[in-house]
Image: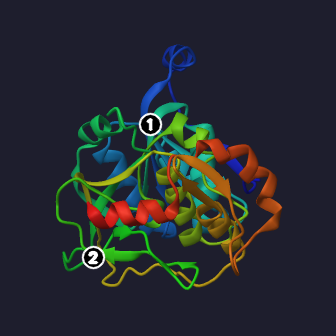
Amino acid sequence: MSSSYRLFHRKQDIGKRISLLHREQLLSVAMVAQEKGEALARSVEHLAELSRWPLHVLMDEEQGNIGELTERFPSVTFIVFALPATIGAMANVVANECYSTYFYLTRSDLRHSNYELEEALKYLEQSEKPSVITPLLSNRLGEPIPTIQTPLAREHLIDPVSFIPKGALEPTLYPFLGLGLYGRALFQRLRGFDEAIESDYWQTLDFGLRSWLYGYPIYNSPTLQASFFERQFVIEDRSAAVGIKRVHTRALGVRQIKGKNYLRKVRRYQDNHLQEEMRRRLSLYKTDFYQLTEEWKIS
């Protein structure tokens, strides 16, 4: 269901390309383009110099001349979408195309002050198997952005509460703006982002909820820190969108009683088209949303 795109591979010498066919890269970096033209080129240059890992740039056809970009940055792979795509569609394509064990999803309007990807990888390899390690974020004034999210439902609407990170490893409900370090195999086992949801916010919330309810936590870590170098206010669009019922049905449509899972109807936000999916995946739930919320309050 991913949007139509074209792939422009980075140039490599033939010997290296053949050797890479027989082994998987450890890590790839994927940058979602937020700018156009020369501004985008400067951001590509910044991250290409910062990172020793293969870099993928996700963009649409209106954001730059792909011929000029590939000539200027021969070591970068460009994934060019025919039309602007959601963060979920782009992340799914990265997971399919990067051929690495892990991938880090970032944006072109960020500048990193801490970029310890190898340290962040250690958290993904812990026994509890987190699905994402998310970065600490700040605005152009250096003020921290409230990117720690805790689960809460108000009048049958899931509406997480946001907090400022404490600067230590701590849980968060979902990857803010989709940003973070992912394990590719687990990401695909969780079926990635749901592209039937037409909202970046609801896509990332849906992924985070599935991660936690299936037993895979998400953490925010100071090993990754970045700032929006030109933005003072960074706010998610939480308005209702196509697919919002899919989020609520998956998250609220299961109750766990004495360790046994049961399907239930969701008031107001029930998506009946998900009933067969819910039955197939009922055994995957390690907890339900209400227990997750209570445990979060206790911790």
C-alpha span from label 1 to label 2: 27 Å
Please give the name of the residue rendered at 48% of the width and 70% of the height, measured from the top-left corner.
Answer: 35
> Mark 1 vs mark 2: which is more N-terminal?
1
* Circle number at residue 192: none
| Tag nearer the camera, 1 or 2 | 1
Q: Is residue 40 above or below residue 268?
A: above
Identify residue for label 1: 102
Q: From the viewer's perspective, is 23 left or right of 110? A: right
Q: Position of residue 235 (x, y in %)?
A: 42, 81
* Secondary structure at numbered mark 1: strand
* Secondary structure at numbered mark 2: loop
Q: Position of residue 119 (x, y in %)?
A: 23, 39
Q: Is residue 84 above or below residue 130?
A: below
Q: Quadrant of residue 87?
A: bottom right
Residue 83 seen in render = yes
Between residues 291 and 231, which one lies in front from this camera angle? 291
Q: From the viewer's perspective, is 66 left or right of 23? A: right
Residues packed near mark 1 inside 10 Å, few (<14), some (14 to 19) or many (20 plus): many
Q: Position of residue 212 (x, y in %)?
A: 47, 53
Residues packed near mark 2 inside 10 Å, few (<14), some (14 to 19) or many (20 plus): some
Residue 8 seen in render = no
**Amino acid residing under circle 1:** Tyr
**Amino acid residing under circle 2:** Asn
Q: Quadrant of residue 38?
A: bottom left
Circles 1 and 2: CB atoms closer than 8 Å: no
Q: Position of residue 52 (x, y in %)?
A: 32, 36
Q: Quadrant of residue 61?
A: bottom right
Please give the name of the residue rendered at 29% of the width and 73% of the height, measured from the top-left corner.
Answer: 229
Identify residue for label 2: 139
Please give the name of the residue rendered at 54% of the width and 34% of the height, measured from the top-left corner.
Answer: 185
Please give the name of the residue rendered at 54% of the width and 71% of the height, measured from the top-left corner.
Answer: 201
Question: Which quadrant is the C terminus positioned in?
Answer: bottom left
